[in-house]
Each structure stands twice: as structure tokens, then as C-alpha cells.
Image: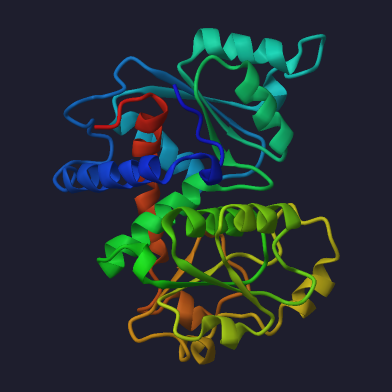
Amino acid sequence: MKHFINLKDISTTDLRKILNDAKKRKNKRKKLNTLDVDNDRPLKGKLLIQMYEKQSSRTRLSFYIAINQLGADSITVKANDLHLGKGGESLADTAKILSNYGDGFLLRTDSDKKIEDFSKNLTIPIINLLSPSSHPCQVLSDVFTVEEIKKKPISKLNICWIGDCNNVLNSLIAASVKFKFNLNVGCPKNYNPPRFVLDWVKKNNGKINIFNDAKVAAKNADVIFSDKVVSLNDKGNKEKKIRDFKNFKVTQNLMKVTRPKSIFLHCLPRGDEVSEDIFLGKQSKVWQQALNRVHVQKSILLYSFGKLR
């Protein structure tokens, strides 16, 4: 049993095994329908319990498909449907109940501490579907997509992030250390990645380049990543934030400074941080990126259950 909470806590060897397994599994599904079960049915008889404390489209749907393709079943519960620290039941007690009824727990939450507390009390694997500081499933799938499109290891590519420094970027930074790729971050002043992330990078002999000019950051990039500047749960001054990011929009002018055949990726949902012509243009690979979530998440599940081939 292995938890999947943060990329920084998983070895490069294991991350690469997940990607290799996902590639093999995707290739074997070319003639299968969405809910056709993989021939080996590696998780037959397993029940995965999913809990979403935050809204979700791609993560919820892709994990539902992934679980079914592996031969398992899933149930989705709402946090307010459980006691979960209320009515005299502690989180630890809830974790023990989940461990008795299910074989794995998938959590999307607004609390890093909650994931940490669950991981200490569960006797089944927990997978982080998104937390305030991390979005590991998204970013590992993004690495898969980049290598699939570019047909080379991500370590040989220049990767650029344009926009807000959030949980997705935190995981991308962790991936840059694990897979040793060059990462430029373009963001306004006072929006740099958090100190705990930069300290971890330094401790692990990694390096990221932070620029307060979008074009400088994007120069010679093979891949441009972006994300919504104002998220659904953003509690800050939204109007000020939009003004601060006005020069960090992915447009045709920005993409002109990237390398020939560069691509654009976005975890979705989108906002004004990317122009319509780029988002719907030939350089955009966002739909392939979203679909690949299914394949990589299947292999993440197998990793957590110790069943990687």
C-alpha cells in the first residue's frame, strides 16, 4: 500500500514506472469502448471511496472511468453526508470506518492538514485529487502528455509556466526536480511561488527560473502551461489580481517567442489568461491533456495498490 499525495515524496523511479505503465495501458485500449474493462482486471473486487469537498469535472469523471476500466467499483460521498469530526466522531474514527468498508480513499479537499491526518489514520491508500498546495495527478498526467506529443523525455524540453503561482505550479515545480527539466515561471512581482516550495527545490538541488516578464519567461519554450488566474475559491481582491496579471496572458504575440512547434496546455477550467485563438488553435493540446488523465490515473491507482507491471 502506498499513498499518492505529493510528487515530491515519490521517487523518480516510481513516477517513471507509472508513466511507462500508462503508456502501455493506453495503447491496449485503442479498440475498446469507454467502460470496457481492461483484460487483466487488476483491481477486480476493489471498492474506491471518493470524497469531493471542492467542485470537480475532469478529476471526478476521469477517475470514475479509470476505476471502472481497472475492474473496480467506486462510490462518491459528500463531506457533509459523513460525520467527519462532527457529532462526536473524530477524523481518525472516520478513517478507520473508511478503511473497513473500502479499499482506497480518494480525496479532493481545501485542507492539506486533512489529507495528512487521513494518511496517518487510514490503513488503505489515499490519493490526493487536489489540495491547496498540490495537484499531483494533474501534473503527472501533464508530463505524460508532453512526452507523448513531443516524443522525447521531458528532461530535453524547455517548459514554461505563465500565470498565478498555485497548487498546480507547486506540483509542476516538484516534477521539474524529479524529472530534471528546465522550468521558467512567468508571474507578476509579489506572486512568486511560496517559500516552502522554493526551499524544497534548493534542498533537492533543483532550479527554477522566475521572471516578472512573460515574454522573457516564454522565450524558446517548447511547452507553455497556464491556469485560471482567479479560481472559484479565490478569496483575495479579485479585481486587483486581474489587473496585476494583465500582462501575463497567453496570446499569439507571446507564443511567437516560443520554439517552433511549441504547444499550449491548460488544466481547465479556463479564464481570461489565454486568448480564444490560442486556446482553440493548433498549438493547444488541452483536450488530449484532459483525456490522458484517465490513463495516468489508472497507473497511479495501480501504484498505490502495489500492482504496477
| Image quarter in which the N terminus is found | top left
- Left or right of 113 in this view: 14: left
Farthest residue in the left direction?
31
Residue located 36% across and 43% down the image: 13
- Looking at the picture, how far across and down is residue 77, in whole percent? 59, 24
- Looking at the picture, how far across and down is residue 40, in whole percent? 19, 26
Res. 285 image quadrant:
bottom left
Residue located 82% across and 72% down the image: 239
- Looking at the picture, how far across and down is residue 118, in whole percent? 64, 23
- Left or right of 183 in this view: 143: left
Res. 228 image quadrant:
bottom right
Is residue 295 among the parts visible in the rendering?
no
- Looking at the picture, how far across and down is residue 150, in whole percent? 29, 69
Residue located 46% across and 26% down the image: 2
In this picture, is 161 found above or below 66?
below
Total numbered labels: 0
- Left or right of 214 in this view: 12: left
Residue toward you, 296 or 84: 296
Residue toward you, 203 or 136: 203
Res. 87 image quadrant:
top right
